[in-house]
Image (cartoon, helix red, strand yellow):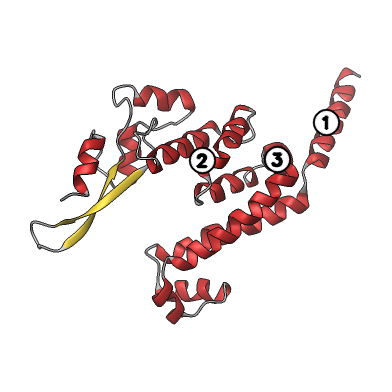
Amino acid sequence: MRYIISVILLLIITNISAQEINYDLKIKLDSIEEKDQELRKLFYPISNEEKKSILTKFGYTWEEFKEEGWEIVSKQDTINIHEVSNIIKQNGYPGNSLVGKPTNTVAWSVIQHSNKIEEYFPLIKKAGLEKEIPMTLVAMMEDRMLMYKGLPQKYGTQASGHEIKDPKTNETVWESFIWPIESPSAVNELRKEIGFKQSIEESAKDMDIDYKVLTLDYIKSLSTN
């Protein structure tokens, strides 16, 4: 009898949880995510045929892509953040309890790709503390916000880079590096506490970067060379 009651209660709770999901909003956010991610694939190492397929899907020609380049992505980012801003005004942050996983991270991704990180970071932090999104995403946004301000990051999630001359070929190439970290000796412990599974060294390796401890003074010197 207890087993039957338990099953009934579980079904009731599950049904209530399902009813709380706003599926119309979920579909809308999933569509925004597709636009956010698909156009970025144009700059991945994929074939020209795949790129042309993406461009056609979004109403662009190959000639327009060659002429505008990243500006195509920037235009879509502007549209996306406008839509997400309206969603937030009406619903608050659309997190796990409103749209479920993985749609709960869509608004975060759009904000991360916008120029409104500082404006929305308090909301993102609140969403993380309330378990609407993973705290690792909060850390990534905080790091990006600090980097954009020219300050050292906390968790080592953000990379930057500069052009250098390859001594072997004398050609100009792009060198990436992990943006300076506030407490290099404590960063791996901070990463672990916030929920990252990888160390800073492992994370950098996944980005094809040989991790080095850099200072802001060194970064500033790059712009003067």
Q: Earlier in the sequence, mark 2 or mark 1?
A: 1
Residue 1 position, x and y percent, is 91, 19
- 44 sits to left or right of 218: right
Residue 165 position, x and y percent, is 14, 58
Determine the secondary structure under disc 1. helix
Residue at 35% over, 40% down: 150
Residue at 26% over, 36% down: 216
Q: Amino acid at mark 1?
A: Ile
Mark 3 surroundings within 10 Å by alpha-carbon count, few (fewer than 14), some (14 through 19), many (20 or more): few
Residue that badge 3 annotates = 92
Residue that badge 2 annotates = 118
Q: Earlier in the sequence, mark 2 or mark 3?
A: 3
User: Which sits in the foreground, 46 or 124?
Assistant: 124
Assess whether mark 1 and mark 2 are in contact (beta carbons under 8 angstroms).
no
User: Residue furthest toward the left?
Assistant: 168
Asked if 187 appears above or below 50 in the picture, the reply is above
Residue 68 position, x and y percent, is 43, 73
Q: Label 2, label 1: how many angstroms apart (C-alpha)?
A: 37 Å
Determine the secondary structure under disc 2. helix
User: Residue furthest toward the top?
Assistant: 2
Residue that badge 1 annotates = 13
Residue at 84% over, 37% down: 15
Q: Nearer the viewer, mark 2 or mark 3?
A: 2
- 64 sits to left or right of 24: left
